[in-house]
Image: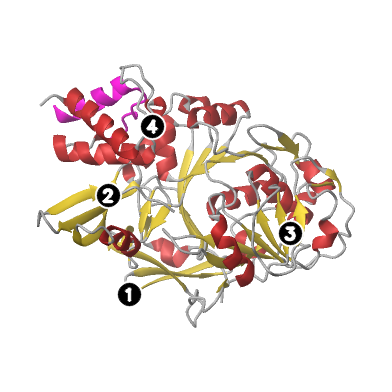
Amino acid sequence: MTPRQTKWKSLRNALSAAGDLSGRFVFGAEASIALSDLIAGSALYGRGDELCGRSVLVTTTSQFTTASALMELDGVASRIILCTPDLPLEHLPYIIESANVDAIVSDRTILGLDIRRPLCFCPCSRKLVTGNYNRKIERQTEWILLTSGTTGPPKLVVHTLSSLAGAIKGGITPAEPVVWSTFYDIRRYGGLQIFLRAALTGSSLVLSDAKESTADFLARAGSHGITHISGTPSQWRRALMSPSAHLIQPEYIRLSGEIADQAILNHLQAFYPQARIAHAFASTEAGVAFEVNDGVAGFPASVIQNTPNVEMKVDDGTLRIRSTRTASRYLGDHPPVLKSADGFVDTSDLIELRDDRFYFVGRRDGVINVGGLKVHPEEVEAVINRHPEVQMSLVRTKKNPITGSLVVADLKHHLLKDAMCVHSRATS
Amino acid sequence: MNVRSEIIDQFTHVAQEQGIPLAPLTDDLELLNSGLDSLCFAIVVARLEGLLGVDPFSSSEDVLFPVTFGEFVKFYDTAAN
């Protein structure tokens, strides 16, 4: 049995209880919102009450409006389906059917969907108005996060606020102001974790912006005095190649989403000697499992047995995780099994024990992680094999110090009869 | 083997393959303003490892990452010699 963890009533409720919010903001590239206004205001033109008990798809063009909409919908909607920023609109009909969506929140004026089911459309704005819905009606909202492969429809992963926030210690505003930031988009699991950390602890948050250069984002994050910041190892390597890297002085740096190698850990510690540097293991399905704080790649073998609130085991070479932070299931037609009968999630991450330390050595399913994007080799092979001059292909991973991995394809050419090697651009 | 010319060749080839306009490769050009994205740099570094036999980015020594094109060349020059 895993111990019970904090039950969050709702995002807005938790933020209301977080103490003094004066001077705490969500900062976007072009605007900012005071956390106290997020509690009192409505990004849905005061129409949040129309979404009570509905299954609500949230598809927005900016993280900024996403933050407002999530604050308003959690505890009100029966489900929030959070679309990722690069989700092809062609997948929306599948998602809407699979999650039984009956309302859409969007800051887009036209979605161009050909869907034959009644849908309540609720526009979403970055400007807040006074809310007028009945906050006494609070329910546990299901949060549906999307994970995508190289092609094909995304998987719909079912969480709750409690499972998403299971690793967060909230309730009290920190005495020393914490200002969070993340290179991630908050519409993905890694970024959502940071948004929730800020919201549940009443801390300011500096959001990244896809239209902003790395240098400009770092300069803006620095101007807001960020103290805590997260990103993938690839995002950190890019940051360290920016002349603006010295404009932030973080106390805490968190890496997740890819394997953190010794080189990036060392480079970060050298560049930010004042910072505590942690690399975390988390995934959309398995939740936040653990973080490693000793500055060394891999993780101590003792982590398997000694991580509070998370049970782990190694079975058939892969890391298995059971905790209240894991997702509960997938939605959709004939969904794959997310947990085994005993409640463990198979991460498919192969780990190897060397000198009392575990190291990640690849994926059982062959998925290649290129800078945080998952690439399925068989899908790449299928595309390459469509070329009339290709007899056969074998796609494999090649370790890379910039993106963690690269996709490499060995080809047998009909005419040349030689093996060629190409590097492929990952697309999603 | 001239490290600088190999690097210029790889920057140019990868930019062409990916259809990305490449800024003039002067020593003071900031790498993140070159036009190449992270995937392009990943490919450049992989190919330079094959050509030069070194990958200074994978060194776990706590040297600083290059910020400009000139520093990138020096990064490889130092590793290759």
Which SS class for mark 2?
strand
Amino acid at circle 2:
Lys
User: Is disc 1 on the same chain as disc 3?
Assistant: yes
Q: CA distance from mark 4 to mark 1?
A: 38 Å
Residue A44: x percent and y percent? Answer: 79, 50
Tell me which numbered mark, 4 or 1, is placed earlier along the sequence.
Answer: 4
Looking at the image, tell me whether mark 4 or mark 2 is earlier in sequence order. 4
Q: Quick one: label 3 or label 2, which is nearer the N terminus? A: 3
The quarter of the rendered structure image containing the N terminus of chain A is: bottom right
> What's the residue type where badge 1 is placed?
Asp
Residue position marked by numbered label 1 in the rendering: A316
Q: Nearer the viewer, mark 3 or mark 1?
A: 3
Q: In this rendering, is residue A48 above or below A102?
A: above
The residue singled out by tag 4 in the image is A270
Q: Determine if residue A6 is in view.
A: no
**Callouts 4 and 2 on one subunit:** yes
Can you give x and y, in whole percent of width and height, for residue A201 in the image? Answer: 69, 48
Q: Over which residues does the magenta segment extend? A: B58-81
Labels 4, 1: front one: 1
Dot 3: chain letter: A
Picture disc at residue A298:
none
Residue closer to the observer: A357 or B24: B24
Residue A27 occupies quadrant: top right
How many badges with numbers are in the image?
4
Q: CA distance from mark 3 to mark 2?
A: 40 Å
Residue A181 seen in the current view: yes
- Where does label 2 land, which residue? A399
Q: Residues within 10 Å of mark 3 (few under 14, many from 20)?
A: many
CA separation in Å, label 1 and label 2: 23 Å
Among numbered discs 1 and 2, the one appearing first in the sequence: 1
In space, the residues marked 3 and 4 are separated at their CA atoms by 41 Å
Residue drawn at x 49%, y 36% as measured from the top left: A275
